[in-house]
Image (cartoon, rainbow, N blue to C red):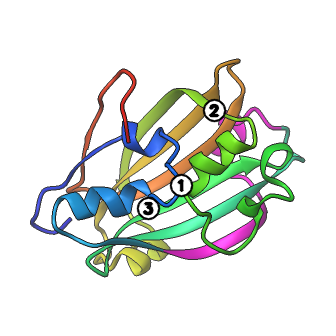
Amino acid sequence: MSGDAWISETAPYLAPREPGQSDAWTDEAARRGRRGSQRLLHVGEVDAPESVRSALRLSASERVILRSRLILLDDRPVELADSYYPLSIAGGTPLAEPRKVPGGAVTLLEQLGYTGAEVLEHVSAAVAGAEECAHLGLPEGSAVLHLLRLTLTGEGAPMEAALMTMPAGRHLTYRLGKQSA
């Protein structure tokens, strides 16, 4: 994040929000005296990339709902976040609509009967592609971190796969156990 270290914890992003409470990113940034926001880039039904299709245990013909967002800190882009949901879960819900979901996707999913009980994350590094450079304001040849986060229900069923792309200076902190938002 160009010069200033930012350590982000996963746990608050997996907890449903209380009515009227802002999303986890807005809260995290505000606790640090900053302004977090996000801009929807695309929402709709798509073919999932292979890594997502495999994580969600979908056949090659099954499509997903994609919610693609640009995450901003003080109006500067800091992350691309693409969340993929099986059509059986998100089809016909506000997740499939190109608008903000009050309380965030985790809150809506819980209301729909899907509560995350286990999270698997895979982190890798790569050279940013042209689209990633354009959205994140990075020079060509910049390194990025890719994080694939798979959220499973208590029964072990995949409910969301999120692909996040961050500049290489990002730090992630993991805390295990039940956390309050």
- Which residue is identified by label 3? 22
**Circle 3 residues within 10 Å: few <14, some 14–19, many ≥20:** some
Q: Is residue 100 left or right of residue 166?
A: right
Which image quadrant is residue 58 in? top right
**Alpha carbon separation for disc pair 2 and 3:** 19 Å
Between discs 2 and 1, the one toward the N terminus: 1
The N terminus - image quarter: bottom left
Q: Nearer the viewer, mark 2 or mark 3?
A: 3
What's the residue at 72%, 26% (across, down)?
A: 157
Q: Which residues are magenta?
A: 39-58
**Picture residue at 51% right of the left edge, 40% below the top:** 149
The amino acid type of the residue labelled 2 equals Thr
The disc, 2 or 3, on the residue closer to the chain's N-terminal end is: 3
Q: Quadrant of the C terminus?
A: top left
> What amino acid type should be assigned to the residue bearing mark 1?
Pro
Comparing 142 with 121, the one in front is: 121
Q: Secondary structure at mark 1?
A: loop
Q: Residue furthest front?
A: 19
Do labels 2 and 1 touch, CB within 8 Å?
no
Residue 143, compared with residue 97, is above or below; it is above
Residue 45 appears anywhere in the view: yes
Amino acid type at mark 3: Ser
**Residue 123 is one of the magenta-drawn residues:** no
